[in-house]
Image (cartoon, rainbow, N blue to C red):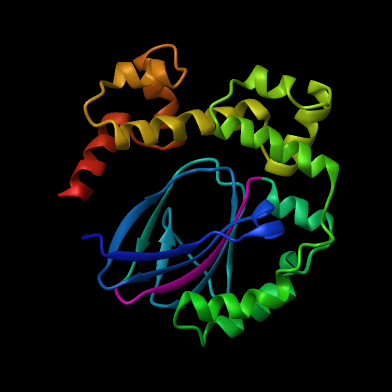
Amino acid sequence: MTEALSLDIEAPQGDASKYVQAIWLARSALAGEVWLPSDAGTGVTFLIKGSALVDDAPIKYAYDFQRHSIQSKKLRYSSEMLLFGLRFQPAGFTQLESFGHPLTDPKNLAFIAKKARCCSDLTDFKKVLEPFFDFSQTHNHIADFTRAFIQQLSEHTSLLDALDQIPLSQRQLERHIKHQCGITPKHLERIYRVRHAMNEIKTKTDSTLTHIALECGFSDQSHLVREFKSIVKITPAKYRTLIAAQKR
């Protein structure tokens, strides 16, 4: 298949950014496929036109829910597909559920899906979401600790150093992370280390995989390959080939 997908992505500002990574639109002219990287986040998609599959499972009407992305997934899409989506921060959706936030209510998601059928661009979709984007009553110190820990990992801090910087016992934090992210802090660190390696492979085209492995905290290239295959589901070499092909 030929990749022919256009994306329009916007990151929310203010309190919303603590819980929502992005509001996005995907539109295809031709059928194709792309890999969706793992980030431990949760996604809700609203398919308006055409068809799409994630790892061969069809995205459903009126909305489709994908919780705790811990491995890369392949998105296959038809021609003339239109797909809107919400991408929540790791732990963001679970945290909002604990507040009883309206954005986590299935009835509200169904309402958004119905209204989204009349949307043609991201501005329209944002207007549909606007009544549900009040996050002023969602402050919680446990959520703050989780957010701070994830921020440390995203900045390539080691797991032990990240744990040391949070004013909770390791056991407490591990329990909260497992509940809110669906995985352990160690698993979360693995995902962020591989994401770091993906970025290095993408931007440092002249670096060897051995150099990238050591730079990203892997013990050697074999360690990088094992982790990459586990989380991205392809080898680093294959990923580099795919990136190079996209730039041609």
Quarter where residue 224 is shown: top left
Count of marks placed on residues: 0
Please identify the quarter of the rendering in which residue 1 is found: bottom left
Q: Please tell me which residue is depicted at 70% across the width and 36% down the height of the picture.
A: 148
Considering only vertical position in the picture, is 148 above or below 42? Answer: above
Residue 217 placement, left or right of 178:
left
Residue at the image point whose x is 38% and y is 35% from the top: 198
Q: How far from the left and from the top, in percent, is residue 175?
A: 79, 32
Residue 192's x, y, as percent?
A: 52, 33
- The question of residue 82 being in magenta is answered with yes
Q: Is residue 95 above or below residue 59?
A: above
Residue range corresponding to the magenta coloring: 79-90
| Extreme residue toward the top, this view | 219
**Is 240 displayed left or right of 195 in the figure?**
left
Residue 86, compared with residue 161, is above or below; it is below
Image-based side of 142 in relation to 228, left or right: right
Residue at point 40%, 72% (across, down)? 51
Front-most of residues 213 and 183? 213
Camera-nearest residue between 165 and 111: 165
Residue 20 position (above or below residue 115): above
- Tell which residue pokes out farthest to the left in this image: 248
Counting from the top left corner in percent of width and height, residue 212 is at 35, 22
Task: Name the residue: 78% across, 44% down.
Answer: 143
Residue 157 in the image: x percent, y percent? 58, 24
Tell me if residue 192 is in the magenta stretch: no
